[in-house]
Image (cartoon, rainbow, N blue to C red):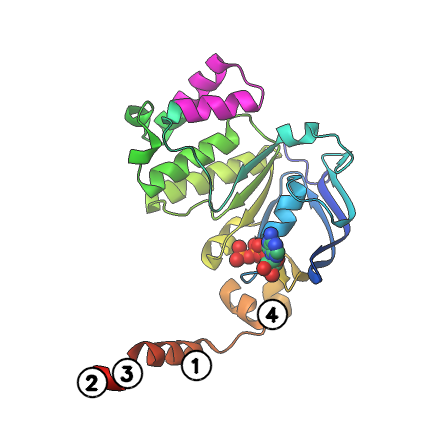
C-alpha cells in the first residue's frame, strides 16, 4: 500500500520569529504519505524549529499547518498520537530500565502495559538487546540507547516519523537494518522526515530532499532533480553549492593555526 497521492503534512506560509530574528521565512510544503523526506540544512537553518512546530512543541508562528487532515494549533492534540519522534538529544530517564522506559512511553501513547511490554521486548530482541531489557539505561552504550529511542518512537505504530540523526552511534550492521526498516515503513504509507548532516545517507535514503538555508527552502526535489539543477555530483557538493560554502580549507587552516599559537612565555 503506497498512498503517495495523499497529503500527510501541509505547510502554508510558515513564518517564525525568535525575538526580532526571523528563523523561518515563508515555508510552503506538501509532504505525501509514503514519502521519505530528507530535511537538511546548515546548523541554525531552522530544521528543528520546523519539526518542533509540527510536533506542537512551539507556538507563536504564523501560517497554516495541517497534519493528517487536522489543522494543528487549534487545541486538538489527537494528531500527536499518530506521530513518532526521535530527537537528536533525548532526555531518557536513564535510571529506568529499557522495560520501564518503553512501557512508560507506550502507555503515554495509549497502549496497555502488557501490549507495550510484549511489543518492546520483541523489538529489543530484533535489535539484539533482549538480554538488556531489564537493565538500567545508564549502563547502555550510545548505540544501544539510540536503538531504545528508535523503538520508543515506533511502539505505537505512528503514521508520521520525525527522525533527527537517527543513525547516530549505530554500527554498520545496525545502520543497514534501520535503513531497511525505514524503507519498509515508507512502502506501507508512513511518512518520514529524516534530518541528518550525513549527506551520503540522506542521498540514498530519501525520496525527496528539502534543503533549508537561513530559514528558507532553497532546494526541493529528488536527488536526481537536484543534481540536474546544480550540475554537481553528490549531495554534499549540492549542499555546499546551494548554501554558498567553499571555504573549508581556509577555515581549517585558521583553526589549526590558532591551536598552534603559543604565548611568548610558553616558548
Ligand atoms: N529557543 C530559542 N530561542 C531563540 N532562538 C532560537 C531558539 N531555538 C532556536 N533558535 C534559533 O533559531 C534558528 C534555527 O535554529 P534550529 O534549531 O531550528 O536550527 P537547525 O537547522 O535545527 O540547526 P542544527 O543543524 O544545528 O540542529 C537559529 O538561529 C537558532 O539560534
Of pointers 3 and 1, the one earlier in the residue sequence? 1
Distance of mark 3 from mark 1, alpha carbons?
A: 23 Å
Identify the disc placed on residue 267. Answer: 2
Q: Position of residue 184 (x, y in %)?
A: 52, 35
Q: Is residue 207 visible?
A: no
**Which residue position holds label 3?**
263
Q: Are marks 3 and 2 in contact (CB under 8 Å)?
A: yes
Q: Is 178 located above or below residue 101 in the figure?
A: below
Which residue does the image show at 39% across and 76% down from the upper left?
Answer: 252
Majority SS type along the magenta span: helix
Q: Are marks 4 and 1 in contact (CB under 8 Å)?
A: no
Q: Is the C terminus in the top left, top right, bottom left or bottom right quadrant?
A: bottom left
Magenta region: 100-121
Of pointers 4 and 2, the one earlier in the residue sequence? 4
Distance of mark 3 from mark 2, alpha carbons?
A: 7 Å
Identify the disc placed on residue 242. Answer: 4
Asked if the stretch drawn in magenta spans residue 185, the answer is no
Which residue does the image show at 41% across and 33% down from the upper left?
Answer: 148
Q: Are marks 4 and 3 in contact (CB under 8 Å)?
A: no
Residue sitting nearer the eye, 257 or 86: 257
Q: Secondary structure at mark 2?
A: loop
Distance of mark 1 from mark 2, alpha carbons?
A: 26 Å
Amino acid at each position: 500500500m503506497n498512498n503517495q497521492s495523499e497529503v500527510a503534512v501541509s505547510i502554508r506560509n510558515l513564518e517564525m520569529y525568535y525575538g526580532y530574528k526571523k528563523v523561518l521565512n515563508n515555508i510552503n510544503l506538501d509532504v505525501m504519505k509514503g514519502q521519505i523526506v530528507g530535511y537538511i540544512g546548515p546548523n541554525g537553518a531552522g530544521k528543528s524549529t520546523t519539526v518542533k512546530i509540527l510536533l506542537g512543541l512551539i507556538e507563536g508562528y504564523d501560517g497554516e499547518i495541517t497534519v493528517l487532515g487536522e489543522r494543528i494549533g487549534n487545541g486538538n492534540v489527537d494528531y500527536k498520537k499518530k506521530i513518532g519522534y526521535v530527537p537528536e538529544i533525548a532526555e531518557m530517564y536513564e535510571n529506568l530500565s529499557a522495560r520501564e522506559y518503553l512501557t512508560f512511553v507506550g502507555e503515554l501513547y495509549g497502549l496497555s502495559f502488557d501490549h507495550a511490554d510484549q511489543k518492546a521486548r520483541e523489538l529489543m530482541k530484533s535489535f539484539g538487546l533482549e538480554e538488556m531489557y531489564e537493565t538500567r539505561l545508564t549502563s547502555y552504550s550510545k548505540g544501544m540507547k539510540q536503538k531504545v529511542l528508535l523503538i520508543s518512537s515506533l511502539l505505537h505504530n505512528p503514521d508520521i516519523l520525525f527522525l533527527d540523526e537517527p543513525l547516530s552511534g549505530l554500527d554498520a550492521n545496525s545502520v543497514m537494518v534501520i535503513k531497511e526498516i525505514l524503507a519498509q515503513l515508507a512502502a506501507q504509507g508512513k511518512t518520514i522526515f529524516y534530518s541528518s548532516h550525513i549527506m551520503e545517507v540522506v542521498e540514498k535514503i530519501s525520496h525527496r530532499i528539502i534543503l533549508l538555508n537561513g530559514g528558507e527552502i532553497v532546494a526541493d526535489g529528488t536527488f536526481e532533480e537536484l543534481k540536474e539543477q546544480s550540475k554537481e555530483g553528490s549531495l554534499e557538493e549540492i549542499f555546499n553549492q546551494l548554501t554558498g560554502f567553499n571555504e573549508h580549507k581556509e577555515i581549517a587552516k585558521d583553526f589549526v593555526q590558532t591551536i598552534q599559537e603559543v604565548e611568548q612565555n610558553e616558548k
